[in-house]
Amino acid sequence: MKTRRVYSTADLDHARSAMQAARASGVADEDLSLIARSDIELEEIPENRKDEHTDFKPAAVRGLAEGGATGLVAGLVGMAIPPLGVTLAGAVAVGAAGALVGAWTNALMGASSPDPVRQKFEGEIEAGRILVVVDGEGEAGDRADRAVVATGATPLPFEQPTALS
C-alpha cells in the first residue's frame, strides 16, 4: 500500500525540482501531483499534474465497503428470522444493494467536500505555496522523502495510506 506524503514549496520551479527528485528516486510519474491556490492552478499547473479537488473517489470506496458490510449483516439477520424467508442468495443480494447505496451516497457527500490535503493545509495553499503530493510505497517512498526534502521542500505533517493511487 502506498503512503501519501505532502511537501510545501515556494513556487512552481521548486515544485518541479521536488517532483524530479521523487521521480529519480523511483516514484512513478502518475504518483505525483500538485495542489495550489486556484489562480495559480489555472495559470501555471498542467491539468495532468493537478490533484483532485474533492473527496469523491475515496468517499465512494469507503461507502462501498461500509454499505456492503452493513447490507450483508442485514441480509444474514434476515436469514436468521425464518418468517422472512431470506435465502443465502438473498443475503448476498442485500449486501450488494447495500454496497451500491453506500457507494452512491458517500460519493455524493464526497463530491461536495474538499480532499483531506486541501482541508488540512488550506493556510499553506492560500499563502501561495505549491504543495507537492507524493504517493510512494515502502523503500521507494522513503527514498523519495529524503530526495524531495534535499531539494528544499518542507515536509508537512501528513502521512496517510492511500489505496487509490
Image (cartoon, rainbow, N blue to C red):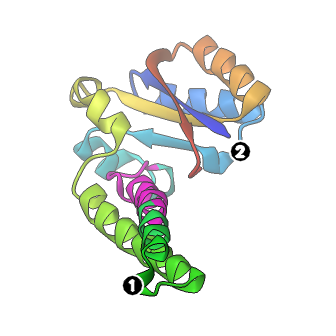
Disc on the earlier residue, 1 or 2: 2
Question: Is residue 36 in sight in this rendering?
Answer: no
Residue 144: percent from left, percent from top = 69, 25
In the picture as drawn, the residue positioned furthest to the front comes out as 82
Main secondary structure along the magenta-highlighted residues? helix
The span picked out in magenta is 50-69
Frontmost of labels 1 and 2 is 1
Q: Which residue is mark 2?
A: 28
Q: Nearer the viewer, residue 78 or 41?
A: 78
Q: Nearer the viewer, residue 76 or 162?
A: 76
Circle 1 Cα neighbour tier, 10 Å, few/some/many (<14 / 14–19 / ≥20) = few
SS assignment at label 1? helix
Question: Is residue 62 in sight in this rendering?
Answer: yes
Residue 22: percent from left, percent from top = 67, 30
Is residue 111 placed above or below 134 in the rendered structure? below
Kind of residue sitting beneath label 2: Ala
Circle 2 Cα neighbour tier, 10 Å, few/some/many (<14 / 14–19 / ≥20) = some
Image side of residue 97 versus residue 164, left or right: left
Kind of residue sitting beneath label 1: Pro
CA distance separating discs 1 and 2: 56 Å
Is residue 161 placed above or below 153 in the rendered structure? below
Quadrant of the rendered image containing residue 87: bottom right
Taking the magenta stretch, the answer to whether it contains residue 128 is no
Residue 37: percent from left, percent from top = 26, 39
- Are the two marked residues, 1 and 2, in contact with CB atoms closer than 8 angstroms? no
Q: Which residue is mark 1?
A: 83
